[in-house]
Image: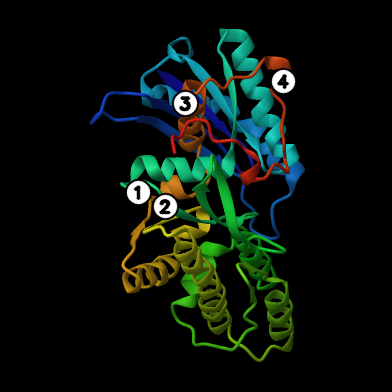
Amino acid sequence: MIVLGIESTAHTFGIGIVNDSRKGEKKVLANVKDTFTTKKGGIIPAKAADHHVDVCDIVLKDALAIAKLKLEDVNVIAYSQSPGIGHCLKIGAMFARSLSAKYNKPLVGVNHCIAHLEIGRLVTSAKDPVLLYLSGANTQVIAYEGKKYRIFGETLDMGIGNFLDSFARDLGLGFPGGPVVEIFAKKGKYVELPYSVKGMDMNFGGMLTNLKQKIKSGKYKKEDLCYSIQETAFAMMVEVAERALAHCDKKELLLGGGVACNKRLQEMCNKMCKARGAKMFVPANEFLVDNAAMIAWLGLLQFKAGDKLKIEKADIKPYLRTDEIEVKWRKD
């Protein structure tokens, strides 16, 4: 079975193609994307949506060429239905409906957050992990329990990626900010910042306010602030992830989301896992960031479990939570 996936939850438009091949054969046939970026400021939803409209045909053509397939060869079309920025989700859903109607292909709508977990299970040897999911709008600790992917901890205000982007914007570093912050952090020293973990949850608003004040004062080096934000925010997330491992009695930690590309975060997670006798799994960067291969793969799993949509029902659900979806494709 060949499934084509469409990713359009935020700044990335992607087309992924996967094949439910026999064991040992390549499953991801193509994973192509084009990303909306800015030199100043953050993501502008309407402009990101315009970007997706401009590049969708090109990205599709490139993905099919890499996979050496035609649309007629595709069995199912999957698209990111939830959660995400409404302007951007609409473009992916519209593109999916158009392809479905033109080529008479069944449709599957998938959850972006769960797709990060399932692609991680595909490309690593993780079996039943706790997912530390760190992206722009999402910061969640997720694990499978009782036919659902339960959220055992999350941000109470903003996602870690948006937090880093806001901080980088105040420093004039452009969007996305995370990779630039990581570079500056390598030459910094620690400055004390607010540390806010509340039970299994965390928030970043107080730290961001404190950082804004420090930036405005002009007394602190960019390098020191970048180093300190990483050390403090990442420690908060590692603490919650460790508690989830203990609470769920699991021995595997899987990283997901674009912020998980950060090498310092990976180092901190690895030290924590070694200390408690757990294993850490980190997919390749192309599967950590927003990508369409994960949409295609989850679409394949859902379709095989009997999930499909009529074109008129192929809508978007920008605010649907991870733990609202029944997981029909896994066996307890």
Q: Of the residues tagged 3 and 1, which is closer to the observer?
A: 1
Residue 10 appears in the picture as rendered: no
Give the spatial CA distance, label 4 vs label 1.
34 Å
Residue at 52% from the left image edge and 87% from the top image edge: 190
Q: CA distance from mark 2 to mark 4?
A: 32 Å
Q: Which residue is mark 3?
A: 300
Which of marks 1 and 3 precedes in the sequence? 1
Kindly give the residue lying farthest to the bottom in the view shown.
Answer: 219
Labelled disc at residue 236:
none
Q: Does the residue at mark 2 contact the one at mark 1 (Cβ under 8 Å)?
A: yes
Q: Given the image, on which type of amino acid does mark 2 rest?
A: Pro
Residue type of the residue flagged with mark 1: Ala
Q: Which mark is residue 313?
A: 4
Q: Nearer the viewer, residue 146 or 32?
A: 146
Q: Earlier in the sequence, mark 3 or mark 4?
A: 3
Q: Earlier in the sequence, mark 3 or mark 2?
A: 2
Q: Amino acid at mark 4?
A: Lys
Identify the element where label 1 is drawn. Answer: loop
